Amino acid sequence: MKKKLLVLSFDALGGADFEYMKEKPAFKAFFEQASICTNVSSIYPSVTYACHTSIVTGRLPNHHGVISNTLLQPKRVNAPDWHWQRKYIKGSTIYDEAIASGMTVGAFLWPVTAKSKIQYVLPEIFPNRKWDNQVMTSLRNGSPRFILDLFKRYGHLLDGIKQPHLDDFVTESVCHTLKTKSPDLMLVHFTDLDTARHDHGVRSKEAYHAIDRLEARFTHIINTLKEVDLLDQTTVVILGDHFQLDYETKIPLNHLLSQAGWLAFENSKVTNWQALAKSNGGSAYLYTKNDAVDRDDLRRYLDTLKTVSENGIARILTGHEAAQRGADERCAFMLEAKNGYVFTDFLGGGEKGKRADHGYHPTEKADYATFYAMAGPGVQSGVRVDQMSLIDIAPTWAQLLGLTLEPVDGVVVKEMLTGL
């Protein structure tokens, strides 16, 4: 019997959420059959687009090329473009190999899938120019007829990209696609929980309400698999990409750099720069404009900033040290924030405040692990894995589906699979 794989990414799901989730009826029934790890290390920086690319490639960010959510664009610091398109990924992905083997693939708001070869793709992308709009942006970057049909059927559920409406739209789109297309591999990205945690805090009542909504969506999807008689041949995955941590203080790095003469800006736009910060929330890249910039002088300035506790800098890495952790070796330096702090590169004020964030090093903060569980054909039931990494997921899927995915930085989690 041909195996199918359905992946449900619950953005910002943590290992710590397992204790709450296992008491919810639908999740409890799933976990009783599943192989589970509540101690999954994310990647560095632990941001959504880098994470989801590591999930489908089995590689670290400096190897797959998606080293941050957004692009380094000195002229668009306050509104940069994101790594939306497949072209930003170096090498192959699990969905590329699936398609090459004759499988059909569906992807719903899965990061970095715009303009990919996925047959049924509703990409995560939004209009970033005044002359553009959401529908046209989606159609240009995804599967046009497929997307138009989904908008016609379920567009009434949407309120822009606000949650929980967006995930409700995704859920109905997924269920409709299961009924009408039955893809062999489906990649689904839900952001309701991530939004709730950013806005209200990691362990806020709003975050737990979001988990409740995710259980309702999960139930709908599982019931749809039963309805179309696909559950017995479908391996189902629930995973997180990163967790979050609460913070109190946001450090405006580019403002600090401007005060020291490393950059200049006017009307919230950079007019000249020698050094520029690129925030990942709990960490930040520091780039220099060219090789003529004195990096030793920049390091002395950063060391001075670090001596002031209120600047929230826990650690300063060189570009080489960042690369050793899987981050972008092209940066001059990389800063790690202390607990209770995050960095911003926003210029000119007016940035909305939040309550929690991510982007920190995946193993240097306590209670920061994410989560992985899967159940179905080819999966051992009742296995508990002590520790794994996001980069182990794609090799494990490749083994499950009989695909070859190379090169990878991760390993197959053999304990979770049957027949090994």
Image (tube, rainbow, N blue to C red):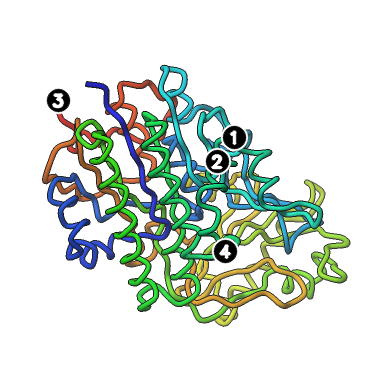
- Of mark 1 and mark 3, the one earlier in the sequence is 1
Point out the frontmost of discs 4 and 3.
4
Label 2 close to label 1 by CB (< 8 Å): yes
Amino acid carrying label 1: it is: Arg
Task: Give the residue number, with chain letter if any, for mark 4.
Answer: 159
Q: Residue 386: x, y in percent?
A: 20, 50
Label 4 close to label 3 by CB (< 8 Å): no
- Of mark 4 and mark 2, the one earlier in the sequence is 2
Task: Give the residue number, with chain letter if any, for mark 1.
Answer: 145
Say which mark, if any, is on residue 219: none
For label 4, the crowd category at 10 Å Cα-Cα, with few meaning under 14, some 14 to 19 and many 20 or more, is: few
Residue 130, compared with residue 4, is above or below; it is below
Residue 188, compared with residue 252, is above or below; it is above
Point out the frontmost of discs 4 and 2.
2
Query: Relative to residue 340, is residue 34 drawn left or right?
Result: left
- Of mark 3 and mark 2, the one earlier in the sequence is 2
Task: Please tell me which residue is depicted at 23% across the width and 34% down the height of the picture.
Answer: 229
Point out the frontmost of discs 1 and 3.
1
Q: Nearer the viewer, residue 217 or 245?
A: 217
Q: For residue 217, what is the image quadrant?
A: bottom left
Task: Please tell me which residue is depicted at 27% across the width and 65% down the height of the picture.
Answer: 16
Of helix, strand and loop, which one carries label 2?
A: helix
- Of mark 1 and mark 4, the one earlier in the sequence is 1
Task: Give the residue number, with chain letter if any, for mark 2.
Answer: 149
Q: Nearer the viewer, residue 365 or 112?
A: 112
